Amino acid sequence: MSLIPHIKGRSLFQPSKNNIDFVTLSNYLLTSSIATVLLSLVFLAVQGLNYGVDFRGGSIIEIRSKNGPPNIESLRETVGSLGLGDIQIQTFGTDSDLLIRVEQQKGGEKAQQYALERILSTIGENYEKRRAETVGPTVSEELRTTGLIAVLCSVLAIICYVWFRFEWQFAVGAVVALVHDIIITIGVFSIFQLEFDLSTVAALMTILGYSVNDTVVVSDRIRENLKKYKKISLSSLVNRSINETLARTLMTSLTTLIVLLAIYIFGGQVIRNFTFAMMFGVIIGTYSSIFILGPLLMKLDVKRDWPNASNS
Amino acid sequence: MKETKVMLFFSRWKIITILSICFVAFCYALPNIFPAEAIKSWPTWLPKKQIPLGLDLRGGAHLLYTLDANKLRASMLRNLRRDVRKTLISAKIKHIAGRGENGIRVRISNKEDMLNALEKIRQLSQPSLSGVLLNNSKEELTVTQVSDKIIHVFINEASVRNSLAETINGAIEIIRRRVNSFGTAEPNIMRQGTDRILVQVPGVEDTSSLKDLIGKTAKLTFHEVHPTNGILSTFQPARGEYRSYPSAENSSNFYNFYFLKEIPVLRGDLLKNALQGYDQFTNEPVISFTFNQEGARIFAKFTTQNINRPFAIVLDGKVLSAPVIREPILGGSGQISGGFSSKTANELAIQLRSGSLPADLTVVEERTVGPSLGSDSIKSGLIAGTVGIAAVILITILVYGTFGIFAVLGLILNGIFIVALMTKIGFVLTLPGIAGLILTIGMAVDANVLIYERIKEELACGKKAIVAIDLGFKRAIVTIFDSQLTTLVAAIIMFWLGSGPIRGFAITLSIGIFTSIFTSMVIVRALVSLWFQTKRKKGRDIIVPI
């Protein structure tokens, strides 16, 4: 053990010195939170989501040009002339990689595969086939339903858990924070028309877990302080709790964001969407555990007459 | 010093247990960083298993088939109607039988036959007697008398379900045999839900030839040829029991159609074996076949009765050849020629051996990944992991100093544990799985952060080092459990509902939750306690370096 040097840590965030008035701050931010949620909902209603192949059906084909940068225009023309409906071709990650999106064909399951085979044989020998995915109408519809069920089930399970562990005010706070995070994240996917697929749903569920994790840590501290300090006002108690946990909240968000950034930059194009959703979710989740939970608890008037804490 | 005993004291045997757990995990994780060839020469006592890679990392084809339950039900109804008619005709009961949506409706011409008819139809429900439907469910049919002349016969839903399950299982076997004959390594063929079959074949890019091989029905039948007008130059409309069958050869052959009895003498499902061989005289590729006992009996009878007349060998509705029977074939074996190459003869023999797929199977989802994308994904996953984890290590040591080093040791061990567990259990690693692994390591710092921040707070309150450290671990554990459990809930639901790559993510995430609780609460605590004990022996004031 004497091999271990005595290194002094340097706090990035000083908990004892922080005394930010989060409660007052969040009263201002609450309006913008509500506005963002509403904006997201409007975009979802008007513009909807840009479903990926999992949910939309049809095909995607990733190809790589064998001889230098591909001629997208001519490819668009040849593939477009096959009469397979709307076909999008764009570069994917690098200049020589292309992604072809084919809309779902009319005429059931077999038509999808026929379309895929037609395109693959048209593309010819100048391209290397990297990936091809075809999802038929039955499966895409099923995946949409299971995706929705998965998110709803997770929210429900988490509500039950928080309710079981804390008082109902905390559960309500956690749920509002969660719904806020989920709606805004989906909203961003709608606003920028980012591809929304099965991996995005997985990211959403991980965000749920992460966001509630943050919320639980803050709730734990609020409850502990409720037992400890009976005289101080609820708003300064909530402020105190958030300030005390701030160092932890920020440190964990930082390490999580750093690995996500590494995956986003180096992990390849295939999971870039997934990582983006995660990064966004971590940021919004951190925000909601600081600025949403506390003020809600104050509005819901959490009880103060706790039995004495077994404080040493 | 009572509190030291509680959280900060580790007995010798505990330390030894922890060290041995780490050693075992290390041994299981180790093979993953070596190429497969290098591992072969290792001593036998070392584990050699590597994490199986998902299709998205190794490249390959993923096909999801669905069996149409409605078509199956329709064919069961057809069989049922045929059976009912056969039974009633042999009992000389005049009747009309019609097919409805879920059953058949039988109108008996004479009221007096009613009881007899009911009894006969009910006997059909006895599995041993029907033989056509199922043979393992007790009550297959619901037979009700609606009026004095009308009987309704329904196939029970349970027996439809049973039949679906059996058909799926049969289809899985057939697909397995066909895919195995394709000659690729470790195909994975399994049932999904009630009516789906998942086929995963690593290393296959050309799905269309794979699908052809799996989907080919290879329906072989032997037909009687019309006695006087068997060979036609043009298509003839069906007459009586006979109808036109096209020739398999689409050349300028003069004989384009054959006039054959529609109900075959024999079906390919009575074949016992089929092999590719060569004709002993012409050296032309042929398929030699052997019938099972029943087939041999029918074939012997038929060939005895039809000497010097042709019979037609029909594959998938097309006539391969129509040889003339020279002598009775009693042994139940023969050969088929029809202008095959040795490759097509071999493929056909495989299809005949493995039987035909029982009902319409449709591909509803298809994903292929080429080998280049797979290896690119592994590479980029490794780079992302190295960069991400290095950054986390740096920050952790920067913020928590010596204690940060302990946390980092915990993180590294955490990674080893996850890899070891996945290897041992044989969970498949996918690209999202790699992301999950990196993310887990990033998030696992959280447990340490919770503990260390707590220690800092307790120190700030003016508590002694030992008390602060002890309280830090004690108080943080509740929060750690709470926060990890919620992530676990999400991961379990994700596993339950997800498929393929997403499952891989859910798996690494869940395993990571357990291992990170273990590393932060046991290993990091042991390290801190060891550090504490060495410091105390030196007898100086203990300053917590965070």
Image (spheres, rainbow, N blue to C red):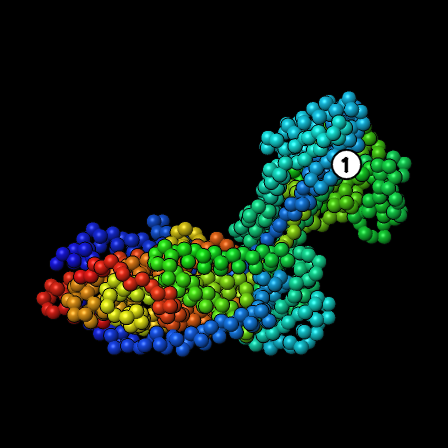
Relative depth, front residue between A152 and A86: A152
Q: Quadrant of residue B382?
A: bottom left
Read off the residue under disc 1: B98
| Residue type pointed to by label 1 | Gly
For the point 71% across and 29% down, the residue is B145
Secondary structure under the numbered disc 1 in the rendered image = strand
Relative depth, front residue between B210 and A217: A217
Res A81 seen here: yes
For the point 26% across and 68% down, the residue is B453
Horizontal side, residue A187 vs residue B316: left or right: left
Q: How many marks?
A: 1
- Could you say where residue A159 lies in the image, as x and y percent from the top left? 42, 58
How many residues crowd around disc 1 within 10 Å: few (fewer than 14), some, or many (20 or more)?
A: few
For the point 16% across and 67% down, the residue is B463
- Could you say where residue B229 lies in the image, as x and y percent from the top left? 89, 39
Q: Quadrant of residue B108?
A: top right
Relative depth, front residue between A238 and B95: A238
For the point 24% across and 58% down, the residue is A307
Q: Is residue A177 above or below residue B142?
A: below
Q: Return the residue found at the far left.
A: B539
Relative depth, front residue between B415 and B325: B415
